[in-house]
Structure formats: structure tokens, C-alpha cells
Image: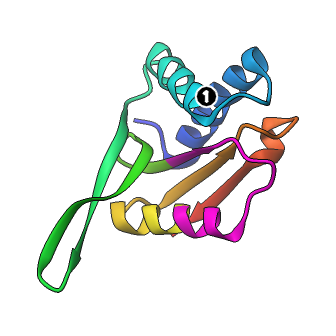
Amino acid sequence: MLIEEELCYEVRGAAIHVHRALGPGLLESAYDKCLAIELHERNIPFEHQVLLPISYRGHLIEDAYRADFIVDKRVVIEVKAVSKVLPVHLSQIHTYVRLTGCRLGLLMNFHSPKLIDGITRVVY
């Protein structure tokens, strides 16, 4: 089993491979689907489009949020394709990390000319 830092390294490598193949400028959904293929091809265990429930006043809202990826039950990945990462995007990945109980999160903005510059690491 990879430690979290090694796992993040492997995931970043998969994402960079996708970005090099496709380049910036596509829709988020394209990068999302291609990253799922790349993670699968590299035998990196992940869950895709994971529903994250919340509780409100005793009511369970099962589909309140949806995380793009949870890798090996330890790292949350949020895929973006935006011209600029906004504070709301950072809040989103922080929320997903907290709700999943994972320690690490990666916000990946595939719109960046170099993906490595578009990856923000979040530690909970």
C-alpha cells in the first residue's frame, strides 16, 4: 500500500499524462472521464462521482455533494476546467476532504497551461 504522499505523486502523474494528451481548453467532463481511464490503467484504486451526504435538522440529504474522485479511500480529487481558481473552489475541496474523512485533497485545474501549476494540495 502506498503512503499518502506516494499516492498523491501517482495521481498527479496520471493527471499530467491526461493533460499532456488533451491540452487545456476542454470541458471538465472530458478531463474527468479521461482521468478515470488513466487511474484505472495504472491500477490506482478509486471511486468515481461519489455521493457525499450531509445531515440537516435530523434529515439525511444523501446527494448533497458529489466528489469527483476518492482515491484509495484516502485522497479526494476535484477536477476543474476554469480560467481561474476561485475561493469557492478551494472551499469546495476543503468541504469534500472534511466530509469524507480523508486527510488530503487535490484540486486540479486542467485549464492551466501546465497542469502542475494548476494543482492545489489541501491537508485536513
Q: Is residue 120 above or below residue 3?
A: below
Q: Residue furthest left?
A: 58
Place residue 29 in its image quadrant: top right
Graded by Cα atoms within 10 Å as few (under 14), some (14 to 19) or many (20 or more), the crowding at tag 1 reads: many
Q: Where on the picture, by quarter, is residue 27?
A: top right
Residue 90 included in the magenta stretch of the image:
yes
Which picture quadrant has residue 31?
top right
**47 left or right, relative to 103:** left
Out of 85 and 96, give the one closest to the viewer.
85
- Left or right of 38? Residue 111 is right
* Amino acid under disc 1: Tyr
Residue at 49%, 17% in the rendered image: 37
Q: Per the image, is 113 magenta?
A: no
Residue 5, relative to residue 22: is it above or below?
below
Quadrant placement of the N terminus: top left
Classify 26 as above or below 47: above
Q: Is residue 87 left or right of residue 101?
A: right
Which residue sits at x=21%, y=66%? 61
Secondary structure under the numbered disc 1 in the rendered image: helix
Q: How is the image coloured?
A: rainbow
Q: Read off the residue under disc 1.
A: 31
Residue span colored magenta: 77-92
- Position of residue 83 measured from the top left corner of the image (x, y, whole percent): 81, 48
Residue at image location 33% in from the left, 45% down from the top: 50
Give how far across and how far down residue 122 sits, in percent: 60, 62
How far across and down, in percent of the image, does residue 32 sit? 54, 31
